[in-house]
Image (cartoon, grey):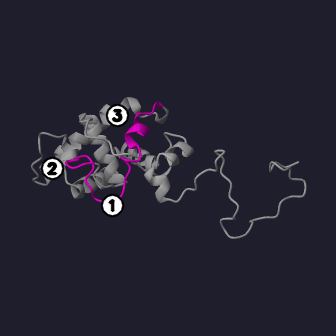
Amino acid sequence: MPPRAPADDNPRTTTLEAFADTIVPGEKRYPGDLAVAGAAEGAGAVQAGAIELLEWNATGVTEGLDDYARLLGDHARDYAAEHGLTLDDSVPPFVALTFEHRTALVRRLTAPDHPEKAFWVLLALFSNMAYDSAAHTSTAEAIAAGHPGLLAMGIARPGDDGLWRFPAHSYGRPLARLHPDTTPSGSPA
């Protein structure tokens, strides 16, 4: 997937991108990228479509994204005050944290005893989902577009007809013999 230019400087978007990048880090998309910390080589959750997935109404969290970003900012300000950190006021508070501090704060928010744990774990799950399943788009389209997570996992490309076929068994052998009454389509007779 091509890198996105720094056109979207919406505070909600950059805050959610910084959160997603903390969950599945990637390399910066462009010089000066503040949301993506550049803590890992290759593309991470943001490049894999985390924002697109979160903004997809099928997730059930879309209407709460402003609240997620606001709460994350509040937690980042509290965390910064607690640790004597000075945040850059020109960017959202969570974005202003270094990757190490973002990680520490997310660890705190997702800890078993945190009262908001369920909300932050849900957001983390969607960040992972964007990377490891491209749930917001069809698998064939994601692979054709070079989806970083699916490519990193080695998901096979479909055939020219758009169908997946696996001529070799993944375990090197069939797991069971076909029932003699199985139809050519694979259905039981």
Q: Residue 37 magenta-drawn?
A: yes
Would you name the residue on which mark 1 appears? 41
Q: Residue at x 23, y 36 (%)?
A: 9
**Residue lying farthest to the bottom in this orientation:** 172
For the question of whether residue 114 can be seen, the reply is no
* Residue nearest the viewer, comparing 182 with 70: 182
Label 1 vs label 2, nearer the camera: 1
x and y percentages locating residue 39 in the rendered image? 28, 59
Q: SS for tag 2?
A: helix
Would you name the residue on which mark 3 appears? 65
Q: Main secondary structure of the magenta part?
A: loop
Extent of the magenta region: 30-57
Mark 3: amino acid:
Leu
* Residue nearest the viewer, comparing 123 with 52: 52
Earlier in the chain: of badge 1 and badge 2, it is 1
For the question of whether residue 57 can be seen, the reply is yes
* Crowding near the residue tagged with mark 1, few <14, some 14–19, many ≥20 C-alpha atoms within 10 Å: few
Label 3 vs label 2, nearer the camera: 3
x and y percentages locating residue 33 in the rendered image? 23, 47
In the rendered image, the vertical position of residue 5 relative to residue 178, given as above or below = above
x and y percentages locating residue 40 in the rendered image? 31, 60
Earlier in the chain: of badge 3 and badge 1, it is 1
Mark 2: amino acid:
Ala
